Amino acid sequence: MLPSDKKWYSEPAIEHGSAFSLTITEKLFEEQSPFQKVEVFATEKFGNLMTIDGLVMLTTRDNFLYHEMMSHPVLFTHPNPKRVLIIGGGDCGTLREVLRHPGVERAIQVDIDEVVTKAALLHFPELCESNDDPRAELHFDDGLKWVKEAAPGSYDVIIVDSTDPVGPAEGLFGEAFYRDCLAALGENGILVQQSESPLYHLELLAEMRRFMGKAGFAHRQTLHFPQPVYPSGWWSCTMAAKAPIPAFREVDATNRPFETLFYTPGTHQGGLSLPPYVARALEGV
Amino acid sequence: MLPSDKKWYSEPAIEHGSAFSLTITEKLFEEQSPFQKVEVFATEKFGNLMTIDGLVMLTTRDNFLYHEMMSHPVLFTHPNPKRVLIIGGGDCGTLREVLRHPGVERAIQVDIDEVVTKAALLHFPELCESNDDPRAELHFDDGLKWVKEAAPGSYDVIIVDSTDPVGPAEGLFGEAFYRDCLAALGENGILVQQSESPLYHLELLAEMRRFMGKAGFAHRQTLHFPQPVYPSGWWSCTMAAKAPIPAFREVDATNRPFETLFYTPGTHQGGLSLPPYVARALEGV
């Protein structure tokens, strides 16, 4: 049992037989939006914690892992990314990382739920520090619809930074959405999406890649990285492209004109180095 | 709170404000040894779970991460490891990985507590499958004393596979022990030790490396890897040597004559690629 002299926030992953818990001190924010319930808690050791419908989204302490790995690998893989679309990402942490790349001319964030960004502005202001960058555009709209209606070839990179494939985000893991993404991407365009835990969700990951393939993304590449507050503490993202995915721009990544806490060409390459049991499960999908 | 319709085994990491929990069905083993309390539980999704004094040691499901990363990187780094000493490691999982290397002529395991191995033989028999290998020797003795009394230069690799630096294992994280290890190692000898979480225990990790340096291990190399059931789900080990640590034998690692679930030359290199914030914290130590 958890010591009762502390207040705990727990996220059980019942179907995987585990739970992760953080000690909290108070609730800082709670709002039921038309889409979901957004809450922010002050924790004892992880800074602030945002949850959506009871699931951990991010903490002040360790969100750098996820946000860096959702943005820098794909941006250093595309030969010259200028137009970036972020679907989801309402906490603005991915947007901040994207805008560190001087070559990016336009970064459009489309999250369905304005309440997520409202909570982030209040309780994760550091993640929102680039929201006023003239290259940034924040829209609160349906990402599925946004991509469907996008002009063909209008983005170089699409980052799907969404919640898990239940509730409002479910459609973001489907073949129809991937087909629309493919159409919205330019010639060397790359889609990247968070793809859950390499320990818990290998079947889901394989299914995502299969759907991406059926939608016309002939090439997929999965990266793994640590993410302590997500189920199993180990997470992944998957890139997808019509054309063969080139080796990443290692020299540019080495000479990146910004600081990172986790990302380097080495951790990028490490992320791409899949454990054999994962590689086997993803073989041919 | 954790759902009360399940039985949970929880390990709080109070000073880091988190806890990890597994759903369990029954207790399979419990014995108070002269040193510690050893328990084994059946879990719903992680196979069996061994704990020592209430701390998670390993589960059937994910121990491959730790055991592979404690053995293969160091064994593929030493130019020709023949004589291996394992301090701790009573579950025999590290021993099994070590003995996969055909070049190893002798692997001596010295755990202070026979009860750990008794529990492993009963409830983790797969980890003990090499215990009868003619190259294996199991001793139940004090590792500190064993190393102190070892003939100079008698080992190529020493693997310290111990519990955390509290209780019986505390001395295994100290300068005097490292000095004895250095004397017990041959010319190209390498020590490797589990070195806790890169998120939670950076100061401890830095201190270990400082002690190793003061003991005469002029060269240190830390690797990180996922380990879901340990605090933060992210773990590390640290190699130490008197001579500069050579690049690992990548060709041999690629052509390894055994199967692995996590280890490859790619995950080895990935483990060596430290995140910038970790590299900075370990600079000069």
Image: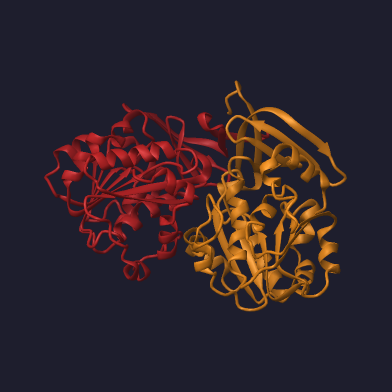
Chain colours: A orange, B red
Query: Which residue occupies the extreme top position in the image?
Result: A5
Viewer-nearest residue: B139 or B265? B265
Q: How many marks?
A: 0
Query: Which residue occupies the extreme left position in the image?
Result: B151
In the rendered view, would you say B138 is above or below B203? below
Residue B169, given in percent of the width and then of the height, sits at: 32, 33
Viewer-nearest residue: A178 or B65? A178
Q: Residue at image x 83%, y 72%?
A: A151
In the rendered view, would you say B8 is above or below B34? below
**Residue B84 falls left or right of residue A146:** left
Residue B77, given in percent of the width and then of the height, sits at: 29, 59
| Quadrant position of the C terminus of chain B in the picture | top left
In the rendered view, would you say B246 is above or below B24? below
**Residue A35 falls left or right of residue B226:** right
Q: Residue at image x 88%, y 45%?
A: A34
The reply to whether residue A241 is in sight is yes
